[in-house]
Image (cartoon, grey):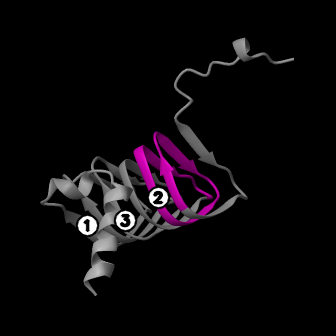
Amino acid sequence: MLSRKDVDLKGTKNITVIAEGVKVEGKINCPGSLRIDGMVTGEITAEKDITIGKEGKVEANVRTKDAVVAGSYKGDMIASGEVEISSTGKFTGNLTQKDALLTISKGGLFRGESLIGASAEIFKPKDEKKDLENIDLKIKKI
């Protein structure tokens, strides 16, 4: 029998894995790293990094620090760090970065625009409460 003492859990508490065959629709807020080998549609925020495995398919707007795309990605991505598209990766959409830290391996596909963000505000995590307050204000003005 495997006991908790036998498993090294150090550093694994902030890794979220969406396994192959799993489909997720909606909004994901991940306080650490995220690995996707299944399918995700919606909106993703990962504070550390996001990895889309070879079999992973993502159709979402993403905010993250670093990203590795080995599968299929479609959407707009805001990354404050490095973005790598591997030889099996397909990226379709717009990429906004703090600095020009985009690597595309031979065989990798990038279709869209790569932009360097002038405003540091877009790289900060969204405050949902403020977003809701802004929505309320807009509704009241109409």
Is residue 35 within the magenta segment? yes
Give 138 or 109, whichever is nearer the viewer: 138
| SS at badge 2 | strand
> Which numbered tag is attached to residue 44?
2
* Residue projecting furthest to the right: 1
* Residue type highlighted by circle 2: Ile
Q: Residue at x 33, y 54 (%)?
A: 127
Q: Does 79 appear in magenta?
A: no
Question: In terms of depth relative to the viewer, which is nearer, 100 or 19?
Answer: 19
- Can residue 3 be seen here? The reply is yes
Q: Secondary structure at mark 1?
A: strand
The residues colored magenta run: 27-55
- Residue 4: image quadrant is top right
Q: Is residue 2 left or right of residue 45?
A: right
Q: Earlier in the sequence, mark 1 or mark 2?
A: 2
The relative height of residue 110 versus residue 62 in the rendered view (above or below) is below
Residue behind mark 1: 114
Quadrant including the C terminus: bottom left
User: Where is residue 75, by image quadrant?
Assistant: bottom left
Label 1: few (<14), some or many (≥20) within 10 Å? some
Q: Name the mark nearer the viewer: 3 or 1.
A: 3
Q: Is residue 112 visible?
A: no
First-in-chain label (3 vs 1): 1
What type is the residue that disc 1 sits on? Answer: Ser
Residue 132 badge: 3
Q: Residue at x 52, y 46 (%)?
A: 34
Q: CA distance from mark 3 to mark 1?
A: 29 Å
Direction from residue 26 to residue 60 in the image, left or right: left
- The residue that appears at 31% across and 48% down in the rendered structure is 82
Quadrant into which the N terminus falls: top right
Q: Main SS type for the magenta part?
A: strand
> Hey, what amino acid is under mark 3?
Leu
